[in-house]
Image: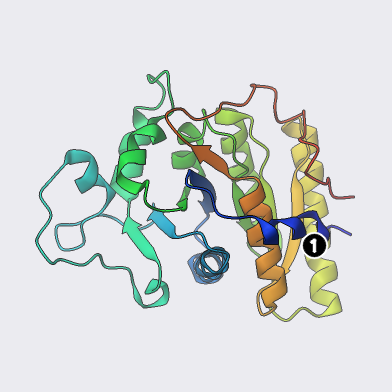
């Protein structure tokens, strides 16, 4: 019952990718194993839908041997013929180390009248989709002028609920944006699904009580391609669009839910 129905985004199958650069945000919470694997699977699904994806990975630090976002922002010369270190699991995706670069943009976001992400458009306009993957403390200031729904991948147990709540709180304090929380099912048994739904209900109750707004939740069986594609479509439907200026949401958006979202019940 906590799942968002697949039909909610099924119509996106017929969408033709647009020339505009879309932007998604995925919150890193330290669950690097399952969280990163899910990120790569989602990006692969989005690329199959016809959207060339570039990932700005805020969990990977730029170095001279592995240049990334900070080098672009500093306009440092790139070594001729040097390839970005994308990692074995992300070999088919454009993945850019971005820890220091995103942190730099985040620190200067408060004094900017426009979104600091606008500065990235000239570098990545040839892609169809830009995915920001970073901790909530870094993402929060960057998303203040955007209209996107960040994804939080919830870990297992009480610790996963607590960590996810902290991420929701940081995003809400900076932006008021509603997030989507996905609980991963590794075996997809009835017992595991019931446990995940209980944890999501606990997280929803805390968010409604203390953050002033509901949270959209879903369970994703990691071995089920249809589940992963469903989540990818939902993220795509609610991605922000980057142009000369990003559309800002009203500060009270957390309590004014868009009609195309279905609140879990």
Pinpoint residue 50: horizontal percent, then vertical percent: 53, 63
Q: Nearer the viewer, residue 236 or 87?
A: 236
Provide residue 63's location: percent of width, then percent of height.
19, 57
Q: Reply above or below: 30 against 106.
A: below
Q: Quadrant of residue 154?
A: bottom right
Q: Position of residue 34 (x, y in %)?
A: 56, 70
Kindly identify the residue that appears in the image at 25 percent across and 64 percent down.
Answer: 84
Quarter residue 49 falls in: bottom right
Task: Give the image quarter of residue 224.
Answer: bottom right
Image point (48%, 41%), residue name = 139
> Which residue sits at x=83%, y=52%?
201
Q: How many marks?
A: 1
Which type of secondary structure does the marked residue at label 1 adopt? helix
Q: Looking at this view, is 148 or 210 the one in front?
A: 148
Image quadrant occupied by the N terminus: bottom right
| Residues packed near mark 1 inside 10 Å, few (<14), some (14 to 19) or many (20 plus) | some
Q: Is residue 243 left or right of residue 180?
A: left
Q: Nearer the viewer, residue 20 or 32?
A: 20
Residue plotted at (78% across, 58% down)? 199
Asked if residue 1 is positioned above or below residue 224 in the image, the reply reads above
Q: Residue 5: in sight, yes or no?
A: no
> Where residue 41 sits: x, y (%)?
55, 70
Note whether residue 100 is visible: yes
212 above or below 14? above
| Residue annotated with mark 1 | 6
Q: Is residue 219 left or right of residue 172?
A: right
From the viewer's perspective, tell me whether residue 173 is left or right of residue 253.
left
């Amino acid at each position: 019952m906590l799942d968002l129905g697949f039909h909610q985004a099924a119509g996106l199958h017929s969408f033709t990718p647009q020339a505009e650069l879309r932007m998604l945000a995925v919150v890193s919470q330290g669950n690097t194993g399952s969280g990163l694997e899910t990120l790569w699977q989602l990006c692969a699904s989005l690329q199959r839908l016809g959207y060339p994806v570039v990932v700005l990975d805020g969990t990977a630090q730029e170095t001279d041997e592995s240049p990334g976002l900070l080098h672009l922002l500093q306009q440092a010369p790139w070594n001729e013929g040097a390839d970005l270190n994308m990692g074995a699991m992300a070999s088919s995706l454009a993945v850019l180390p971005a820890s220091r670069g995103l942190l730099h943009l985040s620190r200067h976001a408060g004094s900017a009248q426009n979104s600091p992400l606008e500065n990235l458009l000239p570098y990545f306009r040839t892609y169809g989709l830009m995915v920001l993957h970073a901790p909530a403390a870094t993402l929060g200031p960057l998303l203040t002028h955007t209209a996107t729904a960040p994804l939080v991948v919830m870990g297992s147990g009480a610790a996963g609920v607590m960590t996810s709540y902290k991420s929701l709180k940081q995003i809400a304090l900076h932006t008021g944006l509603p997030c989507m929380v996905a609980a991963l099912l590794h075996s997809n048994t009835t017992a595991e699904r019931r446990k995940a739904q209980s944890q999501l209900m606990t997280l929803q109750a805390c968010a409604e009580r203390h953050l002033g707004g509901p949270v959209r939740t879903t369970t994703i069986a990691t071995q089920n391609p249809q589940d992963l594609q469903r989540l990818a479509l939902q993220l795509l439907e609610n991605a922000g669009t980057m142009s000369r200026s990003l559309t800002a949401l009203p500060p009270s958006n957390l309590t004014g839910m868009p009609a195309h979202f279905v609140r879990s019940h």
